[in-house]
Amino acid sequence: MQKENNELIISYSFPPSVSAAGNAMAKKILKNNQKVDVIYCNPNSGKRDDDFSNAVNKYITKRYEVDIPFSTEWENIRRFAREGMNVLSSKSYNKIYSMCYFQHSHFLALEYKLTHPDTLWYAEFSDPLTAGINGKDNTFPISDGQYIEQVNKIIPENYPKITSKDTLNFICEYLTYLFADTIIFTNENQRKVMIDNFAYDELKEEIYNKSSICEHVTIDKEYYNIIKSNYEVDSEKVNFAYFGAIYGKRTLENYVNGFDLLNDNFKDKYHLHIFTEQITHFEQLLSQNVIENTTLNPEINYLEFLNLCNKFDVLLVNDTITKEVYSINPFLPSKLSDYEGSNTDIWAICEKNSTMDNKQIKYKSRANDIPSIKNTLNRIMEDKLSLKHQPINKTYERLFNNNYYTDLSKIEKNEDLKVILDDENNTTEYLENRILELSVKIDELIQVAQEEFRKDSHYENEINKLNEYINQIKKENETIKSSNSWKITKPLRYITNKLK
C-alpha cells in the first residue's frame, strides 16, 4: 500500500525528460513507496521517455511543470527558481527533497526553504561540484550583483559572504550547506572529498554533522519486465553489454585492452553490445579487432535498458579514474545500482579503494592493470562457456594469483621468468601498437577538422591551438609507452642477467 506523505520533489530534469539525474530521482520515488508532488522543467525541449514517466506516475499526486527551455546558464537557473516559486506560492509542504546535478533544483529549494523555514529540506549531491572529475570547478562567477546582494542579506553574520568572484558551483554548495537541514552524499568517499575541499574550514564539522550517506537505489525487479525488448543476441557467444557514454577519465580503454589480449581460442567467442548516444565516438576509440566483434546501438529508454540487462551474460561498468587528482575516488557509477537489480553478472574495472572496488561484485579487475584485466576476462570466458576450469596457461595463472608480478623477488624458476617475460613483452608490444593506432586516428581527425576550419580564416587560430594540444597528447603517449616498457622490462632484465 502506498503511504501518504506531504513531500515535494524538486528535480529540474524529471521523466518524461531523459537524463541520468531525472531517472535517479524517479527511482528514489519508486523505492520509497510514498506519494509525492514533483516540480520540474517542461520536457518538450529534449528527448522523452513516456514509459518510465507513466511507471512513476502512481506515486505522484501532483506534477508541476515550469514552462521554460532547458539550459544550464545562470539566467535559466534564476528563471526556474522564480517561476517555480510562482507555481508553489500557495503550496505548503512538511518536506522538500532536491537533487543536484542539476544546480537549478537546489536554487529553487533554497528559495522555498527561505519562505517556509519550518519545512525540512533534504539536499542531495549526486556528484561533487567544485571538486569535479579533474579536481577543478568548471563553472564561472555568476556576475549577478543583484542576486549576490540579496543572498548576502540572509547569510548569518558569522558566516562569510558571497563575492563576485565566487563560481556557480561554489555558491550552490555553500548555500545548500548553510540552509539545508540534511545533506545527502552517495558514498563516504564523496562526502570526504567534498567536505575536505570546501573553502571554509569553520563550516566543515557542521556540514558533516548534518550529512548522511544514501547510495543510488536499486528498484524492484517488476520494473525490469514492464517493457519487453526484442533485441537479439547470439546464444552461442558470450555477450557483454556496455550502456552509456564515455568521457574524460571514464573510458572503455581497459576493456578494449582486455578483449584485444584475450586468449586466442576465445577471440571469436565473444560479442560486445554498446548502447550510447556517442556511436561515432566509439567507432573512433575501439580497436579494429574489437569493433569487428561489436554492435553499436543508439541510446535506449530506461525501462528497455532494465529489461536488456537480463539478456546479456556480463554487464560492464568502470570507475572514473581519479588517482592523479584525489587521494580517494569520490565517484560511484549510478548504473551499477541498475545492474545489481538484474540477474546478470557484472564485470567492474575499479580504481583501488573506490566505493565500487569495496563492493561484492563477481568479476572485478584493477584499472590499468593489464594482467588483472586479462586474467579476469579469460576466467569469464571459461565460466560462461561452461568449460571445465583449466587455465589456458597454468604457470601464468599460478604466478598471477601469487602476486609474482608485484613481487619479482619470489621468482625462482627459469620457466616462471620466461612465462612472465613472454607475456609482458607481448603486452608491451600490444600497447605500443595501440598507442600508434590511436595516434593515427587522432591525426585523421585533425585533418578532417583542419579542412573544416580552413573554410573560414577565422578558425586558423583554433587550428594552431588544436595542433599544440595534439602534440602534447603525442608526447604524453610516448611518456606512457616508455613508462610501461621501463616498469615491466627493467626489473625482469635484471633478473634474467642474474639467472644467466
Image (cartoon, grey):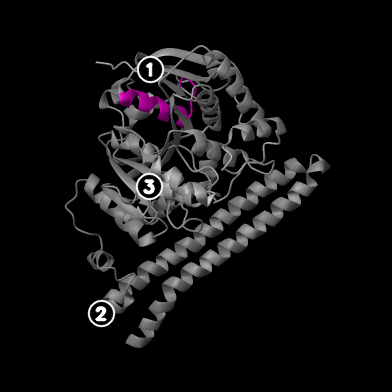
Report which residue position mark 2 lands on.
Answer: 413
Report if residue 434 is visible in the image: yes
> Taking 493 as reference, is 228 above or below it?
above
* Inter-mark Cα distance, 3 to 2: 44 Å
Q: Which residues are magenta?
A: 15-32
Contact? badges 3 and 2 (CB < 8 Å): no
Say whether residue 397 is left or right of residue 186.
Answer: left
Along the line of sight, which residue is nearer the eye, 78 or 328?
A: 78
Report which residue position mark 1 lands on.
Answer: 6
Mark 2 vs mark 1: give the one in front. Answer: 1
**Magenta span: chief secondary structure:** helix
Q: Position of residue 247 (x, y in %)?
A: 52, 44
Q: Position of residue 107 (x, y in %)?
A: 55, 29
* Inter-mark Cα distance, 3 to 1: 29 Å
Contact? badges 3 and 1 (CB < 8 Å): no
Report if residue 500 is visible in the image: no
SS class, disc 1: loop
